[in-house]
Amino acid sequence: GAGVSQSPRYKVAKRGQDVALRCDPISGHVSLFWYQQALGQGPEFLTYFQNEAQLDKSGLPSDRFFAERPEGSVSTLKIQRTQQEDSAVYLCASSLAAREFIADTQYFGPGTRLTVL
Amino acid sequence: KNEVEQSPQNLTAQEGEFITINCSYSVGISALHWLQQHPGGGIVSLFMLSSGKKKHGRLIATINIQEKHSSLHITASHPRDSAVYICAVPYSGGGADGLTFGKGTHLIIQP
C-alpha cells in the first residue's frame, strides 16, 4: 500500500507568514509523529498523536507551533508568524502501534522542506 | 529526555570492509531504532530491537540493554551503503513515544 505522504514537499514563506504542513499517514496507523530536521542535524521530536489525541507536545519549540489530527488520520502542523529559524525539513512518521505503549516501527514520510526568507 | 551518542560521526571505508557504528543512550528503553537516510532522501527504518541481535541481509544490529549500547554492523560493504545511519530511542524511554535521534554517522563506501 501507499506509504506516508506529506504536502507540500517544498514551501517558501516570507518571515511572518503562517504555514500549514500536511501529513497523510499509512491507513490504519494509530500513532503519528512530527519531527523537525535542521540542515546537517538529526531530526528532533516535536509532537505525537495516538489517534486524535495529542499525547505529547513537549518538543514544540514555541507557541507558534500547533498540530492537530482531528479525525485520527490526516494531521496538520501549523506554524504561525514564521521566523528564519523555522527553516528546516519537517518529517512526519506513523506507526501501527498495535499494542498500546509498546514500541513499533515508525514509517517516515519524505518531509516538507520549509524555507523562511 | 534520553540522550543519544553515536560514533563515529564520519566514516570512509573501502568496498568490502566490515563496518561498525556505535550508539549509546542515557535512559533505559523498551526498544532502539536504527534508521538510514540518503542525501536529500527520506528516512527508512532498518531495525527496531529490544534485546539481542537482528540480521537483515548484510546488516546486523545488536543491543546490550544493561550497558545501554547498540551497534550496527555492515558486512561486505558496498558503495550503495553510503548514507547517514541514525540511532534513535524513545524520547522519554517509554515504548510508544516519539524518538530522540543521534546526530548520525555519515558513511561513505569507496569502490
Image (cartoon, helix red, strand yellow):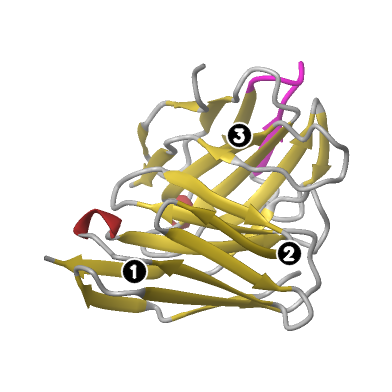
Name the element at disc 3.
Answer: strand
Residue A92 spot, x, y in % from top left: 56, 38
The C terminus of chain B appears in which quarter of the rendering?
bottom left
> Which residue in the structure is indicated by mark 3?
A77
Q: Mark 1 points at which residue?
A: B106
Residue B94 location (% of width, % of height): 83, 57
In the image, taking residue B74 as reference, residue B56 lies left or right, namely right
Residue appearing at x 24%, y 53% in the figure: B80
Of tags 1 and 3, which is closer to the observer? 1
Q: In this view, does B73 lie above or below A54?
A: below
| Front position in the image: A49 or A84 | A49
Chain that bears disc 2: B
Instruction: Check disc 2 and report the residue beneath it.
Output: B51
Q: Distance between the residues labelled 1 and 3?
A: 29 Å
The amino acid beneath tag 3 is Leu
Mark 2–mark 3 CB contact (< 8 Å): no
From which residue to which does the magenta span run?
A65-74
